[in-house]
Amino acid sequence: MKIIGLTGNIACGKSTVAAIFKELGATLIDADKVARDIVGKGNPALGKIINHFGNEILNKDGTLNREKLGSKVFNDKNQRQILNDITHPEIFKEINNLIKKYRSAGKRIVIIEAALIIEREKLKKIIDKLIVVSTSKDIQIKRLKDRDGFSKEQAILRINSQIPIEEKIKHANYVIHNDSDISNIKNQVETIWKDLSSNPH
């Protein structure tokens, strides 16, 4: 089984690319979904988050209010590190469980879609190849404004909080340039898929 990392920065179009790979036959692990699941009600990670950040980060039904938690950690590096120390081991454990499950099921190509692969040594070590999705800063800003209602300043803040895409590309085995239409992106994905499928082990 081949394990492929799929990464890129905010609003680069990772999810679009992941969906095309899935259509072609890849098995997907969405790290964002795993991250949401591990802080679900009753899970140990949520208990640790409440212990540190307090009950005010909860909704009335006892579920995590991601916006409230986000506002506490976004501009505070230390608090963000504490949150990462709580969640990242749990996320990694769950990703490993999924990999074991898919290996037992005889899956050939598993793609882990995650914003932080290069930054997470453990995750970087388990992948065989890395795909980086890239786009221009102008397109990122436009997407963040259209999709999330960010101001230009908010969008730039978010973009600048991540490792520059040029740095990520240095680690890539494949780069997908997501700055034109969907058919162009599909062509790039299909070319990579053929390469991966021709040597799946």
Image (cartoon, helix red, strand yellow):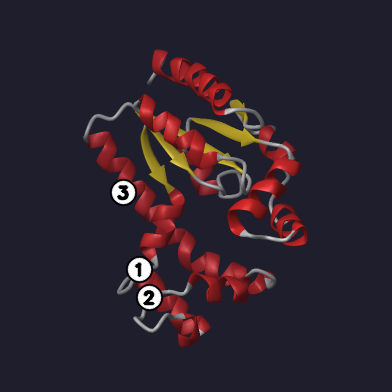
Q: Earlier in the sequence, mark 2 or mark 3?
A: 2
State left or right for residue 39 relative to residue 113: left
Is the residue under label 2 in contact with that under label 1 (CB below 8 Å)? yes
Is the residue under label 3 in contact with that under label 2 (CB below 8 Å)? no
Quadrant of the image occupied by residue 183: top right
- What residue sits right under mark 3 in the picture? 97
- What residue sits right under mark 2 in the picture? 63
| Residue at left offset 64%, top offset 47% | 143
The tag on residue 154 is none
Viewer-proximal residue among 44 and 142: 142
| x and y percentages locating residue 188 in the rendered image | 55, 21
Which residue appears farthest toward the bottom when viewing the image?
55
Quadrant of the image occupied by residue 170: top right
Viewer-proximal residue among 58 and 199: 58
| Residue at left offset 36%, top offset 81% | 62
| x and y percentages locating residue 109 in the rendered image | 37, 28
- What residue sits right under mark 1 in the picture? 40
Q: Could one spot residue 3 in this view of the protein?
A: no
| Residue at left offset 61%, top offset 76% | 72
Front tag of 3 and 1:
1
Q: Which structural element holds mark 3?
A: helix
In the rendered image, the quadrant that contains the C terminus is: top left
Mark 2 and mark 3: Cα distance apart in space: 24 Å
